[in-house]
Amino acid sequence: MGNNTDEKLYRQIVESTTEAIIIQQDGKFKYINPSGVDFLRAASSEEVIGKSVFDIVPEEYRELTVRHTKSILDENKPTGTIEKQLRRFDGSLVDVETNCTPVLYEDKKAIQSVVRDITKRKEIERSLEKVSKEINTLSAPVVPILEGVAVLPLVGSINSERANYILEHVPLKVQEQSVHTLISDFSGIYELDAMVIQCLFETSAVLGLLGVRSIVTGIRPEIAQSVVQLGADLSLIQIFGTLQQAVLDLVLKDSFVSV
């Protein structure tokens, strides 16, 4: 690490930083700063030093840790930022972000790890993912209106994530509800890009393979232009100006058949 002055300055910086810093050598802890002791919820540095680093690595991350350790030491390159979980000395798991760098410690190859607690960030990410799924579920309801007939009311903007959700889940909902005719109402949609339009028409194609008749209503002129420019196949889809017109047509046909 250089001369004694440099080493002393480096140690002062490491000892005072709020980030957990660990040095491992031959698979064992050789150094941990005070913030690291607190982070791992150990009683003292003495409780940590000499222990195997795998004492804090959950089983599912051990193979990854071995691979990264070998790569750092063999290629003498840092790993970059890695997200994983560690097990603290009290047994609790914590989401972390680590940066591992090859160093010389007591004139021998070692690995220095800077560890950051990202629990709050991961909780927010998981919450957002859950909310996103719930929004997608609520924004793609299959609503029964007649026997074997349901409406998929599309409202707001549709991005690729929501379009893919529709492609994956609407055919399942249709089968669960024994729907033979699905009306996709676009009257609440103001803007669609080409990729999303393609995804929605793929949904209609999947429904066709399942024997489900697709009806589209409420397409605005600007959206109709986009559909035409995309060259989407409309042969499997019946189009009505409004939802009311489509329902009236179905009712009239059903009445005619009944007679």
Image (cartoon, rainbow, N blue to C red):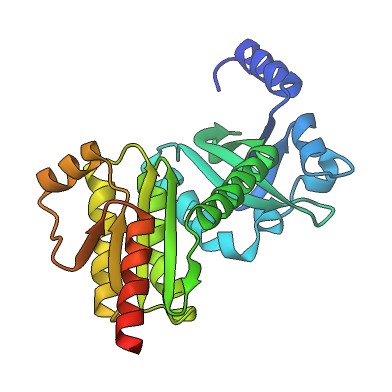
Res. 198 visible in picture: yes
Number of marks drawn:
0
**What percent of the width, then of the height, locates residue 83?**
55, 45
Horizontal arrangement in the rendering, residue 13 relative to residue 187 (left or right): right
Q: Residue at x 24, y 78 (%)?
A: 209
Looking at the rendered image, the quarter that the C terminus falls into is bottom left
The extreme top residue here reads 5
Given residues 153 and 18, the one toward you in this image is 153
**What percent of the width, then of the height, locates residue 133?**
54, 54
Q: Is residue 70 above or below residue 99?
A: below
Q: Residue at x 30, y 82 (%)?
A: 256
Horizontal arrangement in the rendering, residue 161 relative to residue 129 (left or right): left
Q: Residue at x 78, y 44 (%)?
A: 40
Given residues 111 and 139, the one toward you in this image is 139
Looking at the rendered image, the quarter that the N terminus falls into is top right
**What percent of the width, then of the height, locates residue 231?**
10, 51
Q: Is residue 7 above or below residue 21?
A: above
Res. 169 visible in picture: no
Given residues 244 and 163, the one toward you in this image is 244
